[in-house]
């Protein structure tokens, strides 16, 4: 089916508000071509750009979260980790103007402190420069872990509770959510994972409670506009009940 026809079809149905993507398979994509893993990540960055451009141009949904680096990814070879950080930094610096012009608000969620200083500075700058935008909120999960986020919220809440004499009965879901580093994001409606593995890998655990999950064998550098539209079509076939019985 032609891309434009597919797009029209997808537009005719319910679209998610918040989509998350676990961009897996860069290493295998590169290996299959006799290239370095870093080259795979470079191609992965191009795929991420392509998807973000399409989502914002077509206004497909207002929130997109990309899992770029997990708290567990430090265990990769040093030069791969350094290469990934260099790639993120140059991506943020080179794309600043395009992000501003296309109306994207970019936020990087995760523990920034252990990241290289240049990368931290680039994050701070781009977050500030895009803060007023509203066409698409693009969250990049970088040095992120779902458990890290929940633990951080619990610690911050304990600290706050001590200073304002708040009791445990006063802590409800909405209050707890406000303490999460991802508190600005709504629940995730749809999670796409490329690369053939069927797991959640410590992504946004709180927001994943009622998420529809979609797994594809496509390796991330090959994931394109058409693949995204087919995934969204699959989402539109799901019956979402949020634990209730649908009448
Ligand atoms: C998983 O592939 C991918 C990563 C750990 C890094 C993701 C990074 C990018 C896609 C680059 C750019 C992103 C942005 C937002 C600029 P893998 O190495 O685990 O692949 P494998 O499972 O085949 O080894």
Image: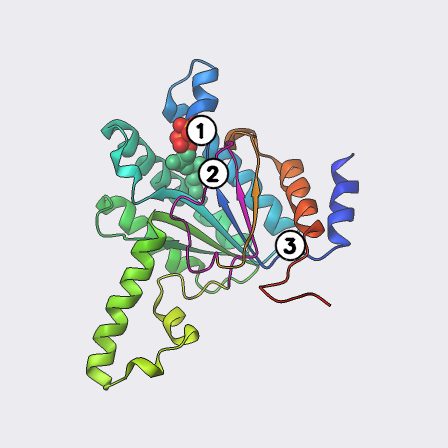
The spot of residue 190 in percent (x, y) is: 57, 52
Instruction: Confirm if mark 1 falls within 8 A of ligand 1.
Output: yes
**Of the pair 112 and 203, the residue shown nearer to us:** 203
Q: Residue at x 25, y 34 (%)?
A: 75
Q: Secondary structure at mark 1?
A: helix
Residue mark closest to the camera, 3 vs 2: 2
Measure the C-alpha gap from mark 3 to mark 2. Answer: 21 Å
Query: Is residue 77 rendered to the left or right of residue 9?
Result: left
Q: Which residue is mark 2?
A: 23
Considering every residue shown, the one lying at the far front of the view is 245
Query: Dot 3: within a 10 Å radius of its alpha carbon, few (fewer than 14), some, or many (20 or more) residues?
Result: few
Q: Which residue is mark 1?
A: 26
Q: Is residue 215 magenta?
A: no
Q: In terms of secondary structure, what is the magenta stretch mainly?
A: loop
Q: Which residue is mark 3?
A: 59
In the drawing, what numbered circle is on residue 88? none
Between disc 3 and disc 2, whose residue precedes? 2
Measure the C-alpha gap from mark 2 to mark 1. Answer: 8 Å
Considering every residue shown, the one lying at the far top of the view is 34
Measure the C-alpha gap from mark 1 to mark 3. Answer: 27 Å
Q: Residue at x 50, y 64 (%)?
A: 186
Q: Which residues are magenta?
A: 187-208
Query: Is residue 198 rendered to the left or right of residue 228?
Result: left
Ligand 1 quarter of the rendering: top left
**Of the pair 136 and 208, the residue shown nearer to us:** 208
Instruction: Confirm if mark 2 falls within 8 A of ligand 1.
Output: yes
Between disc 1 and disc 3, whose residue precedes? 1
């Amino acid at each position: 089916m032609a891309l434009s026809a597919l797009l029209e079809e997808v537009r005719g149905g319910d679209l998610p508000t918040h989509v998350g993507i676990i961009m897996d398979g860069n290493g295998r994509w590169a290996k299959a071509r006799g290239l370095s893993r870093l080259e795979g990540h470079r191609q992965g960055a191009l795929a991420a750009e392509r998807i973000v451009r399409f989502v914002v141009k077509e206004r497909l949904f207002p929130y997109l979260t990309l899992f770029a680096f997990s708290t567990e990814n430090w265990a990769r070879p040093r030069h791969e980790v350094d290469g990934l950080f260099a790639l993120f930094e140059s991506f943020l610096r080179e794309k600043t103007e395009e992000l501003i012009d296309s109306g994207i608000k970019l936020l990087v969620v995760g523990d920034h402190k252990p990241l290289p200083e240049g990368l931290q500075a680039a994050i701070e700058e781009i977050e500030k420069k895009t803060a007023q935008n509203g066409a698409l909120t693009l969250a990049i999960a970088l040095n992120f872990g779902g458990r890290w986020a929940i633990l951080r919220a619990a610690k911050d809440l304990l600290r706050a509770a001590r200073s304002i004499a708040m009791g445990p009965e006063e802590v409800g879901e909405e209050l707890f959510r406000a303490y999460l580093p991802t508190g600005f994001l709504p629940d995730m409606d749809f999670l796409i994972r490329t690369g053939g593995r069927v797991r959640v890998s410590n992504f946004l655990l709180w927001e994943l409670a009622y998420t529809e999950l979609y797994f594809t064998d496509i390796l991330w550098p090959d994931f394109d506009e058409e693949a995204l539209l087919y995934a969204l079509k699959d989402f539109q076939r799901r019956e979402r009940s949020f634990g209730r019985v649908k009448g």
